[in-house]
Image (spheres, helix red, strand yellow):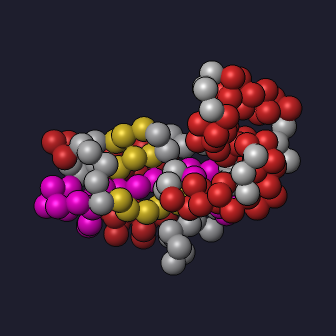
Amino acid sequence: MISEQARARIDEAISKLPARRGALLPALHIVQEELGHISPETARELGELFEIHPVEVMEVVSFYNMFYAEPQSRHHVYVCTNLPCSLRGARVLYEQLEAHLEVDENGNTADGRIHLGHEECLGACAYAPMMRVDDRYCEDLDLDKAKRALEELE
């Protein structure tokens, strides 16, 4: 499952640390970047590589919200719904985006291209309302600005 290129990157990360297990997080990022999620089969491979049980790999995957155990949409869009953003219209914006994208009950578009969710704080209160599109912050939003940010996605 893990490609030779990804394995080489993981080996490089391992070589930079005094303890092999210290490279588990970088390895998970590398594998997820390549495969889109960490499957039980991948957890077995990583477990062998790091000399730990696969369940220990999956414990890390389930602990952090940046790792996924199931296949994911290509793009992740999160609207901040903490108090400062909500006071400036984030909850309304979130509902408008749900309707615009026609997401299902899990927040996914029918084509599986976009997952829409909300987070309690994205740390940009001064620029509320805001959302994160993959790894990019979009700030001081209204519906038109949010739609433009989504139109830029492949």
81 within the magenta span: yes
In this view, 21 is above or below 17: below
The x, y position of residue 55, in whole percent, is 69, 62
Looking at this view, is 103 or 135 the one in front?
135
Of residue 111 and residue 46, the one placed in the foreground of this image is 46
Q: Residue 69 placed where, x, y %?
A: 65, 61
Which residue is located at x 65 percent, y 58 percent? Answer: 56
Outermost residue, bottom direction? Answer: 105
The image position of residue 31, as x and y in percent, is 71, 42
Q: Is residue 71 magenta?
A: yes
Relative vertical location of residue 115 with respect to residue 11 in this rendering, above or below = below
Q: Is residue 89 left or right of residue 134?
A: left
117 left or right, relative to 129:
right
Expressed as whole percent of the image width and height from the top left, the position of residue 149 reads: 42, 43
User: Can you tell which quarter of the image residue 3 is in?
Assistant: top right
Residue extent of the magenta highlight: 67-92
**Left or right for 147, reference 29:** left
**Residue 9 appears in the rendering:** no
Residue at horizontal 64 percent and vertical 40 percent from the top: 21
Q: Residue at x 68, y 50 (%)?
A: 36
Q: What residue do we see at 72% from left, 32% from top?
A: 10
* Number of marks in the rendered image: 0
Camera-side residue: 74 or 50?
50
Quadrant of the snapshot with the C terminus: top right
* Residue 146 shows in this picture: yes
